[in-house]
Amino acid sequence: MDGNRQASSHSPSRNSPVKNFSLNTASSNPATIKSESSPALKPTVVAASGLSDTGSGTSNVVFATVDPNATTEFQGALIASSGGTTVDELVNLALANNPAIKELAATTQKAAGYRTQVGLYANPIVGYQGQQLADRGTDQHLMFAEQEFATANKMQLNRRVQNEALRAQLQELEAQKLRVATDIQTLYYQALAYQKQLTLIKEFQGLMNKGYELAQLRLKASEGSKIDVLQTKVQRSEIDLVYRQTQARYDAAWREIAAITGVQAMSPTTLVSDFPVPANDMRWDDIAATLVSASPEFAAAQARISQARAELERHGVQAIPNLTVQFGAGTDSGTNSGMMNLQVGAPIPVFNKNQGNIAAARAEYSRTLMESQRIENAIRARLAIVSRDFESSMEAVTAYGTDILPSAQEALALAETAYKSGEMDFIQLLVARRTYFESNLQYVNSQSQLAAAKAKVDGFVLSGSLDAVIDRSGSDSLRSLTFSQQ
């Protein structure tokens, strides 16, 4: 491949498959990665300066050094800040510290190293040869140089195979960034929901305290009963229990955020970003097609197909003999004159024609085709689940915001007034209070679920930011195969 490419940001931003669905992380410069055996692909972000190869066996890929213990100034500022935390700040912090991203970055470095190694020529052999040394006056002395020359373009084919492995690893790295960003956003909106619910519960606790005082006053005035006081007390205790449970969920969400970001010292701070408002006219068939065509997960699968195709071509020429050339020059004491020798040899592929590796390469090519189809189907299946969550949450948010909550609030106000004037039974008041309380919590919960579904669509329905990383960076075995034809 030709040309140098500049290092890009580690942000996972891509063109969103949904209108108005954009992830506002750090900007990045798109780079084109051209396959040597397939048309050009255009992933939004690459983690290296490019995939260019000088053709001489040396690689000009430049990677940032991966330091697993590195911290950032932004990390300390976020932990120490008291002005609140936005979702973009947490995403950027996770992208800078998530161990799986650093692990995949290391695999791209390995792949680049292997690509360099498989293109290196064999070292020459230089030596001395002496003959008839015991026969004085007829001894011969010779200096020689020997070199094995790879034929049939084997070294370039080696580099092409490993170049596709590197391209696939870069796409896997981009997919991992999207997984991290999606998981952080999902957890952020969960924690934001718990934060809003805690505020609502506190307000409702104040309402219940006033209701409890009113029930006691009515009991003293012989207008109410002890049952009214006890039922109010029970409902107030239930609200207190919900508060403690919500607080526990809020704290757990922050601990999970700390684990994904790789910053264990993180403490909960006020979340200041609000729930996004997505468009409600989603065309899921179009979104599915966009996700598949632009997904780095699918692009990595396509790179594996190109790698398998290149490896099949490489094994097809393995049996073509290399040439070993030896040239020597020296003196013959018997004739008192100089001498030169030239020797050329090649192995004859009589028994080993690399037929086993060719069969295995064909099978691997077939496997990668099916793997690509599996990934495409998996993307569509995950999107189907997300679309269900999105549509149901959108319906809930709309219903609660325009109908249920206003009605519940009005019903509670009327019930309180009627109860104070003795025109309503206490049980009806309890029902009105409970309905108002649960409707508010469900509204916030629906907003959180809708925001999470939007984040998953923006993130190409990728998740699992701390799942085990599969290292497919390759090896230098093709070089050993090139210079071992026996």
Image (tube, rainbow, N blue to C red):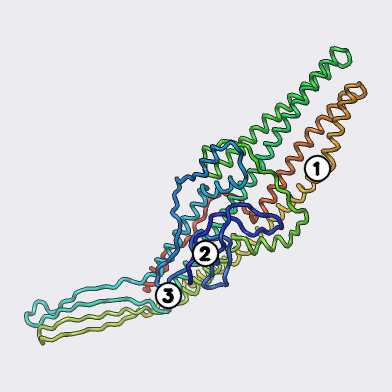
- Tell me if label 3 and label 2 are in contact, CB under 8 Å: no
**Kind of residue at disc 1:** Gly
Q: Which residue is under mark 1?
A: 401
Q: Which residue is under mark 3?
A: 154
Left or right: residue 164 versus residue 288 is: left
* Residue under the image location 45 percent in, 77 percent down: 317
**Kind of residue at disc 2:** Arg
Q: Which residue is under mark 2?
A: 167
Q: Secondary structure at mark 1?
A: helix
Where's residue 94, x and y in %? Answer: 55, 47
Position above or below: 225 against 432: above
Q: CA distance from mark 1 to mark 2?
A: 47 Å
Where's residue 323, x and y in %? Answer: 34, 79
* Residue under the image location 49 percent in, 55 percent down: 105
Q: Secondary structure at mark 2?
A: helix
Q: Is residue 94 visible?
A: yes
* Residue under the image location 80 percent in, 22 percent down: 211
**Of the residues under marks 1 and 3, which one precedes in the sequence?**
3
Looking at the image, which residue sits at the far left? 136
